[in-house]
């Protein structure tokens, strides 16, 4: 099913040039404060892999290139306890 959805989306984007007015509802903000809170709790690898670095400029560049108008940012797992 995921392959079919991916195929339909890429076909649509290819025929229209690029997506316009898209809202990305699954983006994670991984701020230095968030990483510091997890580090102080010894929980940086709770998900089994290191968290990626977050870069505001890089995210905005990606949004512009992909035609994403709005990104909904949430904190990545795991959540700090404090």
Image (cartoon, grey):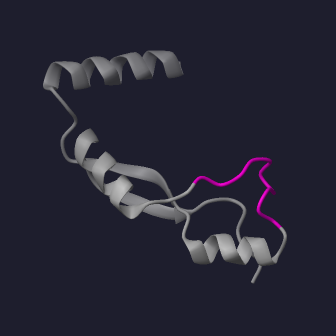
Q: Is residue 19 visible?
A: yes
Give the image quarter of residue 59. bottom left
| Furthest residue toward right | 42
Which percent across, then down, holds residue 4?
45, 15
Q: Nearer the viewer, residue 39 or 20?
A: 39
Q: Nearer the viewer, residue 57 or 10?
A: 57
Which percent across, then down, holds residue 81?
77, 78
Q: Who's the residue at 22% across and 20% down the image?
A: 14
Q: Which residues are magenta?
A: 43-52
Q: Dividing the image into 4 quarters, which one contains the C terminus? A: bottom right
Give the image quarter of residue 5. top left
Which percent across, then down, holds residue 58?
37, 54
Q: Who's the residue at 20% across and 32% down the image?
A: 18
Residue 18 appears left or right of 76: left
Whether residue 51 is situated above or below residue 41 in the rendered picture: above
Principal secondary structure, stretch drawn in magenta: loop
Whether residue 74 is situated above or below residue 33 in the rendered picture: above
Residue 34 appears left or right of 74: right
Whether residue 31 is situated above or below residue 71 in the rendered picture: below
Residue 49 in magenta?
yes
Q: Nearer the viewer, residue 80 or 37?
A: 37
| Furthest residue toward bottom | 82
Residue 31 in magenta?
no
Whether residue 2 is situated above or below residue 68 in the rendered picture: above
């Amino acid at each position: 099913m995921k392959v079919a959805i991916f195929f339909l989306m890429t076909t649509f984007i290819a025929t229209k040039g690029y997506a316009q007015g898209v809202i990305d509802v699954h983006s994670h903000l991984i701020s230095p404060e968030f990483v510091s809170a997890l580090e102080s709790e010894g929980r940086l690898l709770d998900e089994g892999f290191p968290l990626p670095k977050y870069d505001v400029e890089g995210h905005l560049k990606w949004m512009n290139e992909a035609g994403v108008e709005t990104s909904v940012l949430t904190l990545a797992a795991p959540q700090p306890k404090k």
